[in-house]
Image (cartoon, rainbow, N blue to C red):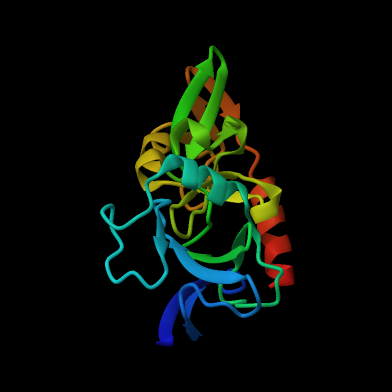
Amino acid sequence: MMLGNVTKLFNPKSFRYICRNVSYIQGQAPESKVREYFYFIDHQGMLFLDDSKMKNFTSCFKEKKFLRFFFNQLRINNTNRYSEFPYVSLCGKERNFVRCDDYPIVFTHVIEKSPDEYYLAHNHASEMLTIKFEPQNIFMLPETGRVYHPAYERVGSIGLVQSKLAIQFSSHFMFQNGEENPPTQFTFKGKTYDLLSDWYYRVATKQKSVV
């Protein structure tokens, strides 16, 4: 049965959500030996089948080895299919189209791998999915209060910090230019960093120019 899904998508050009009708069948085969599936990533970094009626911890994907493979294969969708899904994870003969609440990489907690060496784990795979933590590149968008950190270039170079972790970070921000502007300094493990916000604006502007 063909599914008509109304999807709620983030439009980087306007920083607003838009709705579009998308029709698909989970597991459809548009060509020989190719299967297509459709997924959604929420702002907490949990992965769901896009057409799941209930999206909560019970219905999300939890198997860490699967999550590691899925997110390691994730990239910008340049397949010319389902542009409403900005990302795709190519897993063998499967095309897994992905949309998300904000950005697909969502950092959930800090992992200390050795003294003075910290990583951000993402998308609930713990130590199986990590990116080196760059405290100087933490960024908070004043309009939304959401916090970001650099991510993989193949998915657009920006990752969202999960709200729980963002709240922890926020108590260590300093706002020398007023709280209506991004924070200017961030203290982590007793060391204060001057924040480099230019990276976020540079990457976000580049993304908007190609959407």
**Viewport quadrant of the C terminus:** bottom right
- Coordinates of residue 136 in the picture (x, y in percent): 61, 32
Q: Is residue 116 left or right of residue 173?
A: right
Give the residue at x 63% y 70%.
33
Give the residue at x 46% y 46%.
123
Give the residue at x 46% y 35%.
173
The quadrant holding residue 58 is bottom left
- Coordinates of residue 67 in the picture (x, y in percent): 48, 47
Q: Is residue 159 above or below residue 185?
A: below
- Coordinates of residue 161 in the picture (x, y in percent): 47, 45
Marks counted in the figure total 0
Res. 196 in view: yes
* 163, 41: nearer the viewer: 41
Q: Is residue 126 left or right of residue 91?
A: left
Q: Residue furthest top?
A: 115
- Coordinates of residue 200 in the picture (x, y in percent): 64, 50
Give the residue at x 42% y 82%.
5
Res. 15 in view: no
The quadrant holding residue 84 is bottom right
The quadrant holding residue 88 is bottom right
**Viewport quadrant of the N terminus:** bottom left
* 45, 73: nearer the viewer: 73
Q: Is residue 57 left or right of residue 15?
A: left
Q: Is residue 47 above or below residue 188?
A: below
